[in-house]
């Protein structure tokens, strides 16, 4: 499709203005996802959160400081660009509600709390489990929440504003894995079939 006729044309990230000697520069969000595959120099994507929890895959992150530094940079970038809070002195006027997984790790909550208090200096911070947030947002006090995402599927029953412990399930696969399986099956079957 010619570029001028393509309504869904992707605007690729222009990396020519990026200083390759400056190792502190980075791209976040859609800018990072839209770096061309044949870019020079090559870029590597890092995912600090995988399946709703910290990415502890050793091939991605050698140490936890790198992981937490990336998460800190992503949140700071979102505050400055997406929310328009350019100056960090404005952040202390805001409160933060952080949605955590139903099955959460205590270390996850401690690290996020420390980051919100020291790096961003929010006025107040509260944590809410994702199923509770969904029921409050929908206006129900009791519900069975099923979250089917790209990287995980989680389920939890909520009754009278409390997550029922025995009902919490977190499966580490989701829509992305299903798509990848179908692609591999089609490639194995040599799809599309050749006409004879």
Image (cartoon, rainbow, N blue to C red):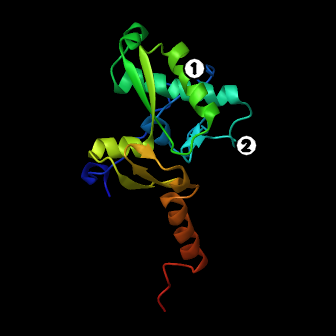
Q: Is residue 31 left or right of residue 85?
A: right
The label nearer to you, 1 versus 2, is 1
Q: Earlier in the sequence, mark 1 or mark 2?
A: 2
Where is 17 relative to 130, above or below? Answer: above
Disc 2 secondary structure class: loop
| Circle number at residue 59 | 2
- Name the residue: 48% across, 60% down: 175
Measured as percent of width and height from the top left, residue 138 is found at 28, 46
Report x, y in % for residue 19: 56, 22
Task: Say whether residue 81 is left or right of residue 74.
Answer: left
Answer left or right for 26 relative to 80: right
Residue 83 versus residue 92: which sits nearer the camera?
92
Q: Relative to 2, say whether 11 is above or below.
A: above
Tell me the distance, in whole angstroms, between the alpha carbons under discs 1 and 2. 26 Å
Q: Which residue is mark 1?
A: 114
Judge by depth and name the residue closer to the eye, 123 or 139: 139
Pointer 1 local density, CA inside 10 Å: few below 14, some 14–19, many at least 20: few
């Amino acid at each position: 499709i010619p570029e001028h006729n393509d309504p869904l044309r992707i605007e690729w990230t222009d990396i020519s203005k990026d200083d390759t000697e400056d190792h502190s520069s980075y791209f976040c969000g859609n800018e990072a996802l839209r770096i061309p595959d044949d870019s020079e120099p090559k870029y590597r994507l890092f995912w600090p959160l995988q399946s709703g929890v910290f990415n502890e895959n050793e091939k991605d992150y050698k140490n936890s400081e790198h992981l937490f530094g990336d998460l800190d940079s992503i949140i700071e970038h979102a505050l400055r660009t997406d929310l328009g809070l350019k100056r960090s002195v404005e952040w202390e006027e805001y409160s933060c509600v952080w949605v955590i997984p139903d099955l959460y790790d205590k270390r996850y909550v401690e690290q996020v709390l420390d980051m919100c208090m020291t790096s961003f200096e929010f006025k107040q911070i509260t944590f809410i489990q994702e199923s509770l947030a969904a029921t409050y947002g929908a206006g129900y006090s009791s519900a069975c929440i099923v979250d089917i995402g790209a990287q995980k599927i989680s389920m939890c029953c909520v009754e009278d504003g409390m997550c029922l412990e025995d009902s919490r399930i977190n499966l580490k696969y989701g829509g992305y894995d299903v798509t990848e399986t179908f692609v591999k099956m089609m490639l194995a079957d040599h799809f599309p079939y050749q006409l004879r």
